Amino acid sequence: MGVVISRGDGGGKQTDAKEYKCYAGPVYVSAPGQCIDVEGIVPSYTIVKLNNVHCG
């Protein structure tokens, strides 16, 4: 299971991906006034990616 977060421009990328059973993270990125990209990965390698969210 894993989580990836970065600024919308791709900078500041932070990842936490290991053999977790319940949750991954926390991860943080400083992005004042910018959008962020968030990606979640579950054990079956299903990936959900949200681009340009939480825009400030």
Image (cartoon, rainbow, N blue to C red):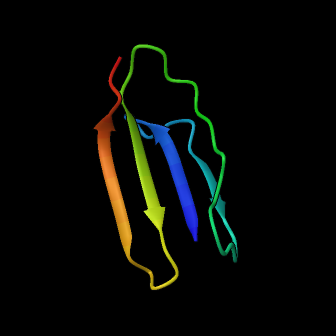
Asked if residue 49 is positioned above or below residue 38 in the image, the reply reads below
Lateral position of residue 49 relative to residue 43, left or right: left
Asked if residue 38 is positioned above or below residue 16 in the image, the reply reads above
- Please name whichever residue, 54 or 22, is drawn nearer the observer in this view of the structure: 22
- Where residue 53 sits, quadrant-wise, is top left
Asked if residue 53 is positioned above or below residue 18 in the image, the reply reads above
Lateral position of residue 18 relative to residue 4, left or right: right
x, y (%) of residue 27? 64, 44
x, y (%) of residue 40? 46, 61
Residue located farthest toward the bottom when viewing the structure as drawn: 44
Residue located farthest toward the right when viewing the structure as drawn: 19
- Quadrant of the rendering where the C terminus is positioned: top left
x, y (%) of residue 29? 58, 33
x, y (%) of residue 10? 44, 40
- Quadrant of the rendering where the N terminus is positioned: bottom right
Say which residue appears at 38% left-offset and 70% top-offset. 47
Say which residue appears at 69% left-offset and 71% top-offset. 18
Say which residue appears at 43% left-offset and 56% top-offset. 39
How many dots with numbers? Answer: 0
Say which residue appears at 63% left-offset and 60% top-offset. 24
